[in-house]
Amino acid sequence: MDMPIPNILIWFIFLLPLASFVLISFFTKPILKKPRLSGYLTIGAVAGSLTLSIWTLISILRAEGHELVIPDFNWLTINGVINIQVGLVMDTLTAVMLIVVTTVSLMVQIYSQGYMHSDPGYHRYYAFMSLFTASMLGLVMVNNLLLMYVFWELVGLCSYLLIGFWFHKPEAAKAAKKAFIVTRIGDFGFLAAILLLFSQTGTLDIAQIHSLALTGAIGGTILMWAAIGIFLGAVGKSAQFPLHVWLPDAMEGPTPVSALIHAATMVAAGVFLVARMFPIFEHSPDALLIVATIGGFTAIFAASMGLVMNDIKRVLAYSTVSQLGYMMLGLGTGGVAIGIIHLFNHAFFKALLFLGAGSINHATGTFDMRRMGGLRKVMPWTYFTFLIASLSISGIWPLAGFWSKDEILVSTFDSQPVLFYLAMATVFMTAFYMFRVVFLTFGGKYRGGTSSQTDTRPHESPMVMIIPMVILSVLAICSGWFNVTGDFGHLLGHGAEHGFIEGFFGILTHPLPWISLIMAFAGILLAYAIYSKNWISATKVRKFFSPIHTMFFRKYWMDELYEDIIGEKILNKGIFARLKLFDSKLVDGAVNGVAEAVMTMGRAIRQVQTGQLQLYGIFIILGVLAIAIGLILWG
Amino acid sequence: MDFNYLTLIIFLPVAGAIVISLVPGLSSKLIRYIASLFTFIPLAISIFLFIAFDRSTSVAGTIQFEELSPWISAINANYHLGVDGLSLPLVLLTTLIGFLVVLISWKINTRVREYFAWLLLLETSILGVFCSLDLLLFFIFWEIEVIPMYFLISIWGAGRKEYSAIKYVVYTLFGSALMLAGILSLYFTTGSLSIIDMTHSGSAMVQSLMPAAPIFFMLLAGFAIKLPVFPLHTWLPDAHTDAPTAGSVVLAGTLIKMGGYGMIRVCVGIFPQVAQDYAQLLLALAVINIVYGAAVTLRQTDLKRLIAYSSISHMGFVLLGIFALGELSMVGAGLQMFSHGIVTGLLFAVTGLVMHNTGERNIGKLGGLAKQIPFIAVIFTIGGLASMGVPGTSGFIAEVTVFIGAFSSNIVDGVNVYTIISMLGILLAAAYILWLLRGVFFNHPLEKFNGTADADRLEKTYCAIFVAAILVIGMYPMILTDVIRTGITPIANLLGG
């Protein structure tokens, strides 16, 4: 692959999955009647995209300034008023995102062959997954804010469709709706920021906006509000406090969907958005501080809820929210590279964790950890890969998670000491809740699965599910090594380069990594003591911390606050109901009242219409007289 | 252009109506075919005109396919037709909807002859409004529309149909009385009835007999009722709720667009200065339309009424785009009118299918239909997504163009605040559309709806045409904006923005 990738093929990274979506929707099922083909089509398309993405990455690494220039074409142009062009930005950030999206997507699509095999909505599933992959790739490639918003909304739409994939389940239908509306609150800010930037600069081209921000042509409060608006969009998409509430519920969707959309890619789009628009944040220290604070707070806040959930997917969901908070913290304190490298590593180990949870569910028919246990022996592959991912996310040297988490802690330590302590506490909590999951599911004795499946013994999943997990576990070990030399960060604009061996072991000569390692091991040890050895009784711990436990378990009552109090009481049954009453009684009532009055008057006047000409004559004379008097007096 | 394309487009439907009502012994089936023929040809011609339309910037503002012949020379009234970038898309929309409603009405079995005659007359009158460049002609077409709509609602409607039909007539006549007064005032001050002349020479023609603002508001009243603008909107949910499906489709699809069209063409075109003076008021009303309309929509439980109220909210975006008075915002308003026409047209059409096939229209009593009528569910979902402005659909690009145009318009002070508040409308739209989809199609399938018929071939066909139009515009909006721009630019230039 010495040759740089031709421009036309770059478009195919996005067009292949899109074509797969169109073919599945309009051809393989309705015309060929071969739903099975949908899976192969999707896998083929995504594999093609992955190949092209790798080629693109190589081309970008070799290109001058690590950027490829792709010609645009017009999409919405009104001379002198607006000019929106479809174009691609091909820099290192895009290349990294392309690799993440296509790799995880391919693994998930292959895995789904096993997981979704007997689902009646098989072809619909793959159609949506193709559309999602295409939209996500579009999102990371486009060079225009409005088009980015387009794909931003489209990934949200796919998320809606896939959370509600089993739409006949009321919880799924409700969760899908909740996810869409909550993220749209964030999108409100994103769109407002787009309007603001356009009205100030007259362009929506990202590079142009950046250069205007760099030269100071836009600045001050305008830049700050634009940054806050964009960040609000990111808060919604990346499930940051206070818009995090949709992500745990989104677990109602099929598990591979959770792995791809709600762990590795779409939810990370918020982090990507902030990274992409970073020049705007860079010139607005206040905005950057908000990013770091929200991120740091969300990290520990979500982790606290992850400590107590019984549903394995919910634990992982809160873990995702927490890790996304880490990424925001990294962006806010250290810059693009710090946040994105964690995004890169997290995509692999978190997708792997979800695929593991799916594999367990495949075997036991439940997501409730109280009904699992003892799966280590019957599901060795799942166990090993899940363990690797858990070690990686806990930040154990030398796995992937260690390297990126360390970078975030270092940059936070330098600039935001308070957030640093929160982040350190989160390291401990992360290790604890992950190994709570490990010990509850794989350790001890089997506790029954679903009531209907008690007689069937759990079994290891088929190879088509195992292989993607193994591949991802390799990445969960070594994806962090790309940055051991500082190369990766350097490409994204941060840090110095040094030798591999020097970096690999040299890091252990610093005190900070040791502190975080000790915190992580303490978390694992505590989980071991409670959930594996029962040295400390889980029930007693729960009783001892009863009020706090309840608060965590009830998710700080935020669902109640949003849904029951704000959504139902204040808005729906309050303001909206009053407005409806106002509309039907007052607005419509006034009109009907006027109509009634006119009718009454008409009836009264009708009495005057006697048909007697003499009477009419008198009226005419009186009228003329009145006019004449009026003219004399006022004329 | 020697050939009188526009006359043909306008009068073919009514010719069909005459054939249907006068030729004795036509079977219902034959009547349907005649109606579809006499609506399909105008559609074909308007597609041709749309392709032949000259989009180059140099001819911006020029009336194309013009027809001008003296009519009542005593009062200087002319038979003056023509289209520009503003009206041509609406002509295309009207002929498209006009053809599709014939297909939508295929299952009408009562008084078929009369029904189709009224439907075709309705199309002629709407097309006349969009093509007339003479105020008297414009007014006559505007008035004719009331009659067929009245009969369509009161005979083929449901529920409180007489009440709703009368309400519709009273509102419309009230507005047109004021409009007529406005037209007469204009005539007496300028001595002309030509919209084009008045737009070109501007206020210079208006002698000081009467201040411009009252004339502006008299004309606006008629358009505001039709759009509809708060607080003149309550006829609309009643008319929609009780109208037959096709009536709702025409009403939402094309009829209320006459309001937005009139506002741009007459109010802003002839009175740019007054429009600018009173823009604050109208923008405030636009925001009320959008947010209040959406809030009231959220509380509706009747399927059709919900979509009717959502129309009020969506037409608020048109009002916002117009009175932000920016070039881009008015292009957005034009785009939104077209988009709303096909999106809400589709929603009413599928709502009709759901109501017809299940016999139920209360959202609370529906549920889980996605398994039983998957095709209708998919189409309804696409229409709903377009209505809440999801990218890829026309609804998205139209609303975003309005937002971007309005926010960056520098003609009215504080317009950015109005724009930001209006954006709440799309948030609420997501809430009511998703609530509706969940209530009607998701959750457990209900036993009582087992065996409910899905769309048949004809129904699938017209749904697919709507969907195709929504997606084409959503993905390549320039197909319309290129045309709309040529009509808006000269009007925007009047405002000197």
Image (cartoon, coloured by chain):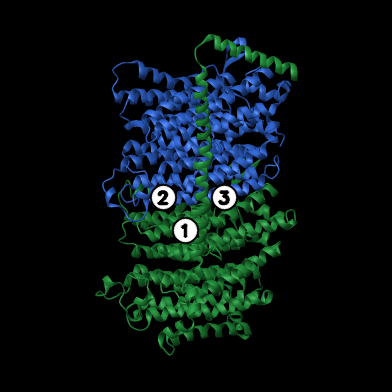
Chain colours: A green, B blue
Which one is in front, A292 or A277? A292
Mark 1 secondary-structure assignment: helix
Which one is in front, A68 or A421? A421
Percent across and percent down for residue A504 are: 58, 80
Percent across and percent down for residue B243 are: 41, 34
Percent across and percent down for residue A135 are: 49, 54
Mark 3 secondary-structure assignment: helix
Which one is in front, A497 or A409? A409
Which one is in front, A456 or A33? A456
Specify few, some or many for label 2: CA neighbours under 10 Å numbering under 14, 14-19, or 20 or more: many
Marker count (numbered):
3
- Distance between the Cα atoms at labels 3 and 1? 17 Å
On screen, residue A83 above or below A233: above
- Distance between the Cα atoms at labels 3 and 2? 20 Å
Residue at 74% over, 16% down: A632
Q: Are marks 2 and 1 in contact (CB under 8 Å)?
A: no
- Would you name the residue on which mark 3 appears? B424
Amino acid, disc 3: Leu
- Distance between the Cα atoms at labels 2 and 1? 13 Å
- Would you name the residue on which mark 1 appears? A178
- Tag shown at residue B437: 2
Specify few, some or many for label 3: CA neighbours under 10 Å numbering under 14, 14-19, or 20 or more: some
Amino acid, disc 1: Lys
